[in-house]
Image: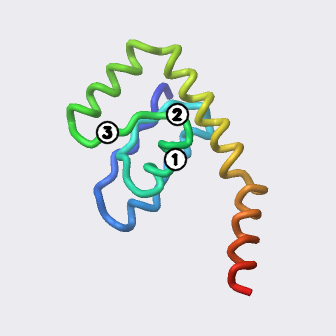
Amino acid sequence: MDIGLIPLPNNEWKKGKCSFYMACCIPVIVSPLGMNSAVLVLGEVRLGANSTADWYEALVFFYKNRSLGHNFGENGRQIVEDNFNQKAICQKLVKVFQYLI
C-alpha cells in the first residue's frame, strides 16, 4: 500500500476515528475532522482534504513526491510510537483517574 485514504463524513461517530495507517509507516490523506485534526498538528505525517479537489491534489502530491511520502510515513510511525503506545495511553488514563479521585 502506498497511501492510506481516510475519507470521513462529518458526524459525531466519525470524529473519533483516526488514521492508524501511520503505524505502518504509510503516508495518509484524511478528512481533517475530530481526532484526525488533533493528529495533523503533531507533525508532517499526512495531508488533510476537505473537497474533491483537495483529495486529487493530495494524491498528485504523493505521486510526484514519493520520497516526501516516505518521510511522512516515517514521521507518522514516530508519532504513533510517541503518543499512542501502551505506555503513553496508560499515562493518560492515570491522569484521568487521578483527576476523578
- Front-most of 76 and 43? 43
Return the x and y of residue 28 as percentages of the image width and height: 46, 35
Return the x and y of residue 79 as percentages of the image width and height: 63, 41
- Quarter placement of the C terminus: bottom right
How far apart marks 3 and 1 lie (CA) works out to: 14 Å
Pointer 1 residue: 39
Position above or below: 84 against 25: below
Residue 6 badge: none
Question: Residue shown at 55%/21% (left/top)?
Answer: 70
Question: Residue shown at 22%/40% (left/top)?
Answer: 51
Return the x and y of residue 69 as percentages of the image width and height: 50, 22
First of labels 3, 1 by sequence position = 1
Q: Amino acid at mark 2?
A: Val
Q: Is residue 31 left or right of residue 86?
A: left
Question: Residue shown at 41%/34% (left/top)?
Answer: 47
- Proximity of marks 2 and 1: CB atoms separated by less than 8 Å: yes
Q: Residue furthest right?
A: 87
How far apart marks 2 and 1 lie (CA) works out to: 9 Å
Please give the count of numbered marks on the rendered protein.
Answer: 3
Q: Image quadrant of residue 48?
A: top left
Q: Amino acid at mark 1?
A: Val
Return the x and y of residue 86 as percentages of the image width and height: 75, 56
First of labels 2, 1 by sequence position = 1
How far apart marks 2 and 3 lie (CA) works out to: 13 Å
Answer few, some or many: residues within 10 Å of disc 3's Cα (few below 14, many 20 plus, some between 14 and 19). Answer: many
Answer few, some or many: residues within 10 Å of disc 2's Cα (few below 14, many 20 plus, some between 14 and 19). Answer: many
Q: Judging from the image, what secondary structure is the residue with disc 2 in?
A: loop
Question: Residue shown at 46%/61% (left/top)?
Answer: 16
Pointer 2 residue: 45
Pointer 3 residue: 49
Answer few, some or many: residues within 10 Å of disc 1's Cα (few below 14, many 20 plus, some between 14 and 19). Answer: many
Position above or below: 48 against 3: below
